[in-house]
Image (cartoon, rainbow, N blue to C red):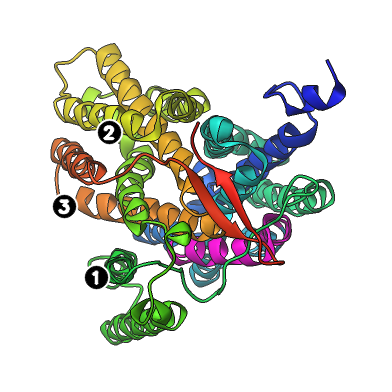
């Protein structure tokens, strides 16, 4: 067997060619999640050290995810334009700054600004989606993206496991500061490693870039209006965050400041719509040739599904320990261990969803996994104190399999829509995951646990309805090279 054939094989133990790119990518994503979620494990120490109230802590948790919604869209566009190597390296380096700033914070205001800025690091996910799609063929892409997402996502669990012990190792009141500082140093160091060892494409391959950085391209009038509609929930989620920060016991923003931000969001949306028109105005005067068309409804469906999958995962991870503690009167340690099983499923579930998609098709697998997700959350809504704890834990783990495998299946389809816009599509779909988290956590603040789980189950059913409109990727994606020749990229067998 030749050296070239060995490099082309999908071998997780290899660190050559495409496998080297995959390993370097998931480690980058892993580090971004360690940095993004370095606050929750040290929350008690931060609260005591800075003298924060419970409402101020809750505010910091909200701010941690707020910026990620627009950041994923923006970083996706930058990735398509400048390439994953530069963007991921820059992101890792730049995000070390607010990480250090939070570690050095002495007041709530300083901590809030740093935490808001750290939401940027949550956008790292979309960069790797584009990078991995450049290196793997369609029949391996779901598995590769699943490994990237699942193993990288484990960074949040790794932060929970390692950072409290690291803070104790440093000792003293400032132990948490040093622990957080270490995550910033790690991010800065890996930015250099990534930049020196990764290339955007295999040797000889073309990296296709979008026509414009300011807005996503569409190829029909109907898709133009659908894109404008699909942008609204992202702005609405940001408005919802502003409402939460200006109402109730938090009151971080005055009524006047909140109204100003609402107005600003409306103006930005209008500006955004204008950019979409400028980029796509040609579709109103002439039809796009059939070979260059893609269907934006594919993106819209995947957005809805990621809202229900990753959105629910972010929301459930943040409340599951408390749910088990209050429902079964467990100790905080025991409740945390049971809840941790939900996150641990990511190591196998997300790659599993991608692998199933490669093997049996994107749409059929998504239909099965979304059905399982709806049933799983409905079952979690039925959990009560009379249940055996082990049965409740098994139910949560079974539900988490469908959630995380569904995430893997969603991003097995994302890179097969339009190659040169994979970053933008991944950015929008990824942002919808954060939109889902904001919506679900807001609902949780208003209802009991059972109703919360039933609501997620209901949105999964809506996702099933949307999924019926999705078409299985087939044929080829057409991309134009710099010399004008058209390359056909296969997306099906």
In magenta, the rendered stretch is 67-92
- Return the disc, 1 or 2, that comes first in the chain's sequence: 1
Residue 147 in view, yes or no: no
Q: Please tell me whether residue 145 is drawn above or below residue 104 in the rendered image.
A: above
On screen, residue 334 versus residue 126, left or right, reads: left
- Give the secondary structure at mark 3: loop
Q: Nearer the viewer, residue 165 or 424?
A: 424
Q: Badge 1 local density, few (<14 within 10 Å), some, or many (20+)?
A: some
Label 3, label 2: how many angstroms apart (C-alpha)? 25 Å
The spot of residue 33 in percent (x, y) is 57, 45
Local SS, label 2: helix
Q: Please tell me whether residue 450 belongs to the stretch shown in magenta.
A: no
Location of mark 1 (residue): 247
Q: Could you give the CA–CA distance between mark 1 and mark 3, rounded to whole angstroms? A: 14 Å
Q: Are marks 1 and 3 in contact (CB under 8 Å)?
A: no
Question: What residue appears at the point 42 percent right and 63 percent down from the top-left corner?
Answer: 66
- How far across and down, in percent of the image, does residue 1 sit? 83, 15
Up-down relation of residue 446 to residue 24 (above or below):
below
Q: Please name which of the two marks, 1 or 2, marks the residue nearer to the observer.
A: 2
Q: Residues within 10 Å of mark 2 (few under 14, many from 20)?
A: many
Name the side, left or right, on which 334 lies relative to 301: right
Residue positioned 61% across, 39% down in the render: 163
The residue tagged 2 is 370
Q: CA distance from mark 1 to mark 2?
A: 35 Å
Comes first in the chain, label 1 or label 3: 1
Residue 68 sits inside the magenta stretch: yes
Residue at 54% x, 61% y is 76
Which element is circle 1 on?
A: loop
Q: Tell me where residue 489 appears, x and y as whole percent.
A: 58, 46
């Amino acid at each position: 067997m030749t050296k070239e054939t060995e490099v082309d094989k999908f071998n997780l133990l290899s660190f050559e060619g495409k496998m080297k790119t995959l390993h370097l990518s998931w480690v980058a994503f892993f580090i971004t999640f360690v940095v993004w979620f370095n606050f929750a494990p040290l929350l008690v120490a931060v609260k005591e050290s800075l003298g924060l109230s419970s409402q101020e802590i809750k505010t910091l948790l909200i701010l941690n995810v707020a910026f990620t919604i627009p950041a994923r869209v923006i970083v996706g566009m930058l990735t398509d334009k400048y390439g994953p190597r530069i963007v991921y390296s820059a992101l890792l380096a730049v995000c070390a700054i607010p990480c250090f700033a939070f570690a050095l914070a002495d007041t709530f205001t300083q901590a809030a600004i740093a935490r808001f800025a750290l939401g940027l690091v949550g956008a790292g996910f979309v960069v790797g989606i584009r990078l991995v799609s450049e290196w793997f063929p369609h029949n391996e892409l779901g598995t590769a993206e699943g490994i990237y997402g699942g193993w990288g996502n484990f960074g949040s669990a790794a932060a929970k496991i390692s950072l409290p012990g690291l803070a104790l190792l440093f000792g003293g009141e400032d132990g948490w500061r040093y622990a957080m500082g270490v995550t910033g140093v790690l991010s800065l160091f890996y930015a250099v490693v990534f930049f020196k060892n990764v290339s955007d494409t295999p040797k000889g391959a073309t990296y296709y870039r979008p026509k414009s950085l300011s807005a996503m391209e569409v190829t029909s009038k109907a898709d133009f209006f659908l894109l404008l509609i699909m942008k609204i929930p992202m702005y609405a989620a940001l408005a919802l965050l502003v409402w939460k920060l200006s109402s109730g016991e938090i009151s971080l923003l005055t009524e006047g400041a909140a109204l100003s931000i609402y107005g600003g969001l409306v103006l930005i949306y209008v500006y955004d719509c204008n950019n979409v028109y400028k980029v796509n105005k040609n579709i109103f005067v002439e039809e796009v040739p059939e070979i260059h068309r893609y269907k934006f409804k594919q993106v819209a469906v995947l957005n809805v599904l990621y809202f229900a999958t990753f959105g629910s995962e972010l929301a459930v991870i943040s409340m599951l320990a408390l749910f088990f503690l209050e429902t079964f009167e467990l100790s905080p340690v025991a409740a945390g261990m049971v809840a941790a099983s939900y996150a641990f499923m990511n190591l196998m579930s997300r790659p599993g969803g991608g692998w199933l998609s490669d093997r049996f098709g994107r749409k059929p697998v998504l239909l099965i996994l979304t059905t399982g997700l709806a049933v799983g959350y409905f079952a979690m809504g039925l959990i009560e104190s009379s249940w055996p704890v082990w049965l409740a834990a098994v139910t949560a783990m079974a539900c988490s399999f469908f959630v995380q495998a569904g995430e893997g299946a969603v991003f097995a389809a994302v890179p097969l829509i339009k190659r040169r816009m994979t970053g933008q599509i991944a950015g929008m779909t990824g942002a919808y995951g954060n939109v889902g988290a904001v919506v679900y956590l807001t609902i949780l603040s208003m209802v009991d646990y059972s109703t919360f789980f039933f609501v997620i189950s209901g949105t999964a059913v809506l996702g099933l309805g949307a999924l019926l409109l999705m078409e299985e990727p087939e044929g080829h994606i057409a991309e134009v090279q710099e010399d004008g020749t058209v390359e056909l990229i296969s997306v099906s067998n």
